[in-house]
Image: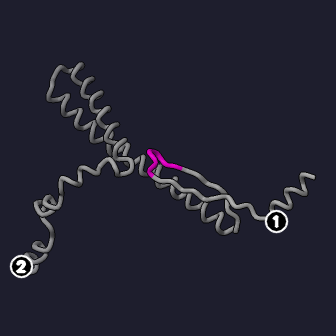
Amino acid sequence: MNNEGNNNSNQPTFSEAFQTIKAEDFKNVGKIPCARNALLYGMGGAFGVGGIRYIVKRAVPTSANWAVAAFCGISLISFEMCQMDRKSKLERLHLIVKESNSRGEKRRVDAQGKDKAFQVIVDDIPSPAKNDNDQSLNK
């Protein structure tokens, strides 16, 4: 029984986890990629769903519950979809950079994510042999 008590004392409690949250953490929420848009979509959706629910049922408590649920659901789904889209774009950009590095040639790739969350630029440096071939074809 003493072993079980030791294992429980090593695990953090809810109050300990809550104490690690600081007010400064909430000031930087807008800097997290996709968070700003997700929160705005959630607010808009909550306003719409809560308003429609109030018009239909004329009950403030149930419309407020629906609004909170809509905010949570829409924010979560839009945040995850944005993160998924962002990760796939980053993977594609990494593949392009890796492919251009393996070929020995460089080309210009200029891509930005939503809200300028990331930016990758690979400059195009044409090889001299490629330019000679292009000029001979044009003659």
Tell me the amino acid under the disc marked 2: Met
- Which disc number belongs to residue 76? none
Residue 33 lies, in percent from the top left, at 38, 50
- Which disc number belongs to residue 129? 1
The secondary element bearing badge 2 is classed as loop
Tell me what residue is drawn at x 21 percent, y 22 percent.
54
Q: Which residues are magenta?
A: 112-117
Tell me the amino acid under the disc marked 1: Ala
Tell me what residue is drawn at x 10 percent, y 80 percent.
3
Tell me what residue is drawn at x 49 percent, y 48 percent.
113
Q: Mark 1 packing: few (<14 Cα in 10 Å), some, or many (20+)?
A: few
Quadrant of the rendered image containing residue 107: bottom right
The secondary element bearing badge 1 is classed as helix
On screen, residue 65 versus residue 139, left or right, reads: left
Q: Is residue 3 shown in magenta?
A: no
Image height of 53 relative to 97, above or below: above
On screen, residue 72 versus residue 96, left or right, reads: left
Q: Quadrant for the N terminus, please.
A: bottom left
The image's colour scheme reads one colour
Image height of 51 relative to 40, above or below: above
Among the two numbered marks 1 and 2 on one chain, the one whose residue lies closer to the N terminus: 2
On screen, residue 48 versus residue 7, left or right, reads: right
Q: Which residue is mark 2?
A: 1
On screen, residue 88 versus residue 63, left or right, reads: right
Quadrant of the rendered image containing residue 106: bottom right
Q: Mark 2 packing: few (<14 Cα in 10 Å), some, or many (20+)?
A: few
Tell me what residue is drawn at x 81 percent, y 60 percent.
131
Q: CA distance from mark 1 to mark 2?
A: 77 Å
Q: Is residue 115 shown in magenta?
A: yes
Residue 22 lies, in percent from the top left, at 18, 56
